[in-house]
Image (tube, grey):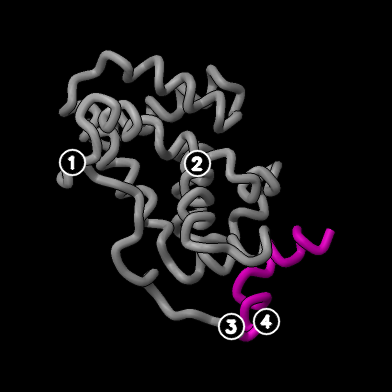
C-alpha cells in the first residue's frame, strides 16, 4: 500500500462516515479487521508519513491558534484530524497551514476526535501481537518539529493572515 491506496481508503472512510473522525475509525476497523499484517503495516507507514509532513513548528502554531495550548498528544491527534479531511485538504494544509482557514469546522481539530482514527490500524495490529513488535510504525514523535519556531504574535498573524482572520470571526 502506498499513497495511491492509502488516500482512497481514507476518502472512502470519510465518505461512508460523513467526515466524522470517530465514525471513520469504525469504518477503518471494519475494513482492516481481516487484513494481513503487511497491509496493516503499509497503511500505518503511510499514516505516519502523512502525520510527519505536518510535524512542523508552523503547523503546531496553527493548531495552537485554533485550540489554545497544544501538548504533544493533542498535536498528534490534531495531525490525525487533518488527515481525516482527505487528500486534497491535507495536501494544501501540509504545504501551508494558513489554508486551514478554508476548513468548515475548525473546532473538530481541537476536540480530540481523531485520536481513535489515528490509532485504529495500530490497535488491530497490537491486539493480534501485543506491543512487543517495535518495528510497527507509530505516530509518536521521535524528534523536534521541523522549521523555525516563531513565538512573536504579530509575526504569527502576518504569516497566517487567512487563519487569523477566520479565527477572529
Q: Does the magenta stretch include residue 155?
A: yes
How far is disc 2 from disc 3 in space, using C-alphas?
27 Å
Foreground pick, 101 / 137: 137
* CA distance separating discs 1 and 2: 22 Å
- Gap in angstroms between the C-alphas marked 1 and 3: 39 Å
Q: Mark 4 points at which residue?
A: 153
Q: Where is residue 122 in the image (x, y as percent from the top left)?
A: 32, 35
Residue 162 picture quarter: bottom right
Q: Residue 15 carries which label?
A: none
Front position among marks 1 and 2 = 1
- Callout 1: 10 Å neighbours few (<14), some, many (20+)? few
Viewport quadrant of the C terminus: bottom right
Queried whether the magenta region covers residue 95, the answer comes back as no
**Residue at label 2?**
115
Label 1 sits on residue: 132
Quadrant of res 15: top right
CB-based contact (under 8 Å), mark 1 and mark 3: no
Per the image, the residue denoted by label 3 is 151
Question: Spatial distance from mark 3 to mark 4, Cα to Cα?
Answer: 6 Å
Amino acid at each position: 500500500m502506498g499513497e495511491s491506496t492509502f488516500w482512497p481508503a481514507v476518502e472512502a472512510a470519510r465518505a461512508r462516515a460523513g467526515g466524522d473522525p470517530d465514525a471513520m475509525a469504525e469504518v477503518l476497523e471494519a475494513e482492516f479487521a481481516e487484513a494481513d499484517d503487511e497491509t496493516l503495516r503499509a497503511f500505518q507507514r503511510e499514516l505516519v508519513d502523512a502525520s510527519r509532513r505536518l510535524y512542523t513548528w508552523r503547523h503546531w502554531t496553527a493548531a495552537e491558534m485554533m485550540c489554545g495550548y497544544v501538548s504533544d498528544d493533542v498535536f498528534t491527534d490534531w495531525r490525525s484530524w487533518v488527515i481525516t479531511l482527505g487528500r486534497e485538504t491535507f495536501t494544501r494544509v501540509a504545504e501551508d497551514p494558513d489554508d486551514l482557514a478554508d476548513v468548515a469546522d475548525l473546532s473538530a481539530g481541537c476536540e480530540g476526535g481523531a485520536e481513535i482514527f489515528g490509532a485504529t490500524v495500530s490497535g488491530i495490529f497490537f491486539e493480534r501481537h501485543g506491543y512487543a513488535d517495535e518495528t510497527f510504525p507509530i505516530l509518536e514523535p521521535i524528534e523536534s518539529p521541523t522549521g523555525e519556531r516563531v513565538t512573536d504574535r504579530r509575526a504569527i498573524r502576518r504569516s497566517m493572515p487567512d487563519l487569523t482572520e477566520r479565527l477572529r470571526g
